[in-house]
Image (cartoon, rainbow, N blue to C red):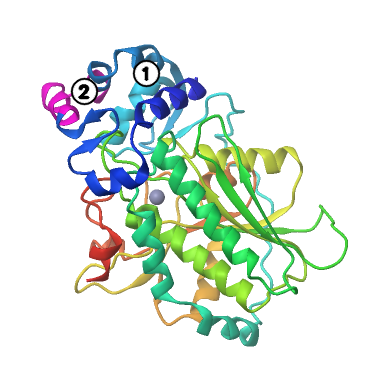
Amino acid sequence: MMYTLAVLLWSLLATTSAHQVHQHASTATLNHPESTILEALSTYNDPVQAMVALHPSSADMLAEPRLLEVMDGSEVRWMTEGDKLRLRREDIDFIDWTRRDLLVERGFQADPNMPKVSHQAQVRKVFPHLSTTNMFEFLETFTAYYNRLYTSKTGVESQRWLYDEILDIIRKAPSTCRLSVEQIPHLFPQNSIIARFSPSGPRNISQTVTIIGSHLDSVNQYFPLLNAPGADDDGSGTATILEAFRSLVQVGYSPVDGPVEFHWWAGEEAGLLGSMDVAEDYKARGLNVGAVLNVDETAFIKVNSTPAINLIEVGATEKLNKWVHDLAKEYVDIGVKYSGMVGRGLDHQAWTRHGYSAVSIVEGDQAEGGWLPFPHTGASFTARNSKS
Ligand SMILES: [Zn+2]
């Protein structure tokens, strides 16, 4: 079904090159002018009706059943693909469990790998290589795609561009780095990406894997065919971990005890689709994941609020949260806080549900209203706006 959706939406969006879309995003999109989309949206309150009015052939696909865990505390239940559009518009998160083993019992989790925080010299050696200029430049291009919807042409193009950026970093790597990168296909057009630092010595799949991730897709929550630059959600996390990756490459990093992986997951906004696929695969292969750090929304600081690293408590591994808290305290000057974020679905939950230890960090301070005020919209920050 997801494949059907993918093919359909992809074909809908495949009419304009990314370059053209960037230049004319306000006037023409997809195979409908934006004005036609807006007209349908003004005629129909229901996003599903609007989509069917624009694309009658999408009706069957939107009626297909989806097993959704809605993050409003209700039961996991069968809904439809169209219901996802409705939930999105209400700003209600969900995890899509269709075709998966339902792992809703938040039971056993392997103990996280939490080595002693004792690598000050090595870590501080990396800091001078980190560049916010690189991050802004990255976001200029990444947010210029009309959207990064997991099924859209620009969603695929933006993901391929990110992959090329990673390849470019790897191409310049010193020989001390043992690096690999792969695109992970899903049942929809956008791929996830995994870049890996492997330790020296023979390959040993029982070694503990450490994962740092973010999601590469974006969505316009009002209606998915509209513009979604997603500079903060999650262009910022994508840029943040890419810069960490780049800097580690520049210092010739080689992990000692097990691989360190950087993941960019596809389709997060459609119910954690990419991270769920990858976590499911790691579990099926019996891989030993020591810890997952998900980085989602890290750029926005509300005027007069205090910058802070927020550790999300919902669905996260408590012990690992505490360790990351201590880690951040050791190496950065920004405050570290805990936030509930009840009702939010973030990629760390894909990993904790599969028995792995995982946490998420986000920007701002919930108590101070420090979150981005308008995520998931066309009005979301562009990189240029974020600078000022
Ligand atoms: Zn996000």
Q: Examine the rendering and report whether any part of residue 184 can be seen.
A: yes
| Image label count | 2
SS type, badge 2: loop
SS type, badge 1: helix
Q: Is residue 329 above or below residue 102?
A: below
Q: Residues within 10 Å of mark 1 (few under 14, many from 20)?
A: many
Whichever of labels 1 and 2 marks the residue nearer the N terminus, that label is 2
In-image side of 101 versus 87 (left or right): right
Q: Which mark is residue 210?
A: none
Question: Can you identify the residue that label 1 sits on?
Answer: 62
Residue 91, quarter of picture: top left
Verify whether residue 363 appears in magenta: no
Q: Nearer the viewer, residue 243 or 94?
A: 243
Name the residue furthest bottom.
121
In-image side of 60 versus 289 (left or right): left
Verify whether residue 42 appears in magenta: yes
Q: Amino acid at mark 1?
A: Leu
Q: Amino acid at mark 2?
A: Asp
Question: Can you identify the residue that label 2 sits on?
Answer: 46
Residue in view at x 28 percent, y 27 percent: 31
Instruction: Estimate the x, y position of residue 22 in percent, counting from the top left.
Output: 29, 48
Point out the image quarter for the C terminus: bottom left
Instruction: Estimate the x, y position of residue 168 in percent, counting from the top left.
Output: 58, 63
**Which region of the structure is painted magenta?**
36-50
> Marks 1 and 2, Cα distance to the nearest angstrom?
12 Å
Instruction: Estimate the x, y position of residue 287 in percent, counting from the top left.
Output: 75, 48
Q: Examine the rendering and report whether any part of residue 323 can be seen.
A: no
Instruction: Estimate the x, y position of residue 181 in percent, counting from the top left.
Output: 65, 54
Residue in view at x 32 percent, y 66 percent: 364
